[in-house]
Amino acid sequence: MRIDWATLPEALRAAIEQRSGAVRAVQDIPHGITCRFAAALRTRSGSVFVKGVPVDDKRGQAAQAQEVAVSGAVPGSVGPRFLWQVIKGGWDVVGFAWVDGQHADLAPGSGDLPLVADVLRKAQALRAPANLPPLADRWPDLGDEDRALLAGETLLHTDTNPHNLLVGPERAWLIDWAMPASGPAWVDVAYTAVRLMESGHAPGDALAWAGAFPCWRAADPRAVAVFVEATCRQWSARVGVRGARPSNERFAALL
């Protein structure tokens, strides 16, 4: 259940205002799977995006800890700038610079597609922090050879769904770095190509879009096959073969 600003503990709200400035207006934000509270706080000096989880929400706090851990590696040219973290009153809350954008439209012909491609290109230059888990750790059944094929030093977002892509008039931002990993740069292109298929692109058109990225053109076909097969196998185990079929068919189209 989501919590609004007024329901947060008074001591927590006071601690947040010490960092953000006095709150003059609040816009609750309903999106976000792992957070229990999210809002835009309007203050005299501008707006701040804040989100948080109760400290006893282990899954949510783990995701937020990942986001904080990689915040120093994500510049403002790629994602909103991380500002502060407050842990008080049984809550863990983080603040980010507010960016004025809408969730990306990934449908065929959308004017957002070039801006999404641009921010993905910028993100490919980011190096993963040394202690970040590698992408291959998500599939414990992989052998050493397959793990090596998925090794890389790029900081990966791995969840480029439209709600994690904000688009303004001239640029886009990657937000919610709750599922980061280290790996080859083409991985986020692959995930986004699958999202394009979900949004109505024919597989060939999504692959043509991916083909504009040099990292995708240079991807080892063996590595892509390991990625696709491991993803489909895991998804089938989670929701069943029938339930996984639509998603798995989109991933298989990457081959």
Image: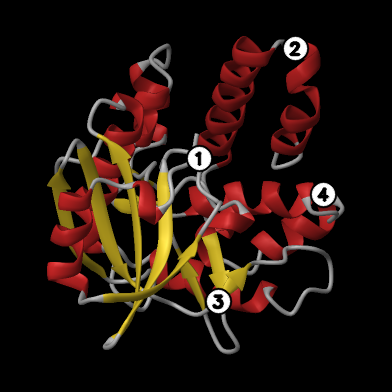
Residue at coordinates 78% horizontally, 49% vertically from top-left?
197
Task: In the rendered view, tell whether residue 203 sits above or below residue 243.
Answer: below
| Figure quadrant of the C terminus | top right
Amino acid carrying label 4: it is Pro
Residue 101 image label: 3
Q: Which percent across, then down, holds residue 160?
A: 55, 53
Q: CA distance from mark 4 to mark 2?
A: 21 Å
Q: CA distance from mark 1 to mark 4?
A: 28 Å
Say what secondary structure mark 4 lies in: helix
| 4 and 2 marks in contact (CB < 8 Å) | no
Residue at coordinates 57% horizontally, 82% vertically from top-left?
168
Q: CA distance from mark 4 to mark 3?
A: 28 Å
Colour style of the rendered protein structure: secondary structure
Residue at coordinates 63% horizontally, 57% vertically from top-left?
162
Amino acid carrying label 3: it is Gly
Of the two numbered discs 2 and 3 in the rendering, the one whose residue sits closer to the viewer: 3
| 3 and 1 marks in contact (CB < 8 Å) | no
Amino acid carrying label 1: it is Ile
Q: Nearer the viewer, residue 14 or 103?
A: 14
- Say which label, 2 or 1, has the lower sequence index: 1
Question: Label 4 belongs to which residue?
Answer: 203
Residue 33 image label: 1
Say what secondary structure mark 2 lies in: helix
Tell me how many marks there are. 4
Of the two numbered discs 4 and 2 in the rendering, the one whose residue sits closer to the viewer: 2
- Say which label, 1 or 4, has the lower sequence index: 1
Amino acid carrying label 2: it is Val
Question: Label 2 belongs to which residue?
Answer: 241
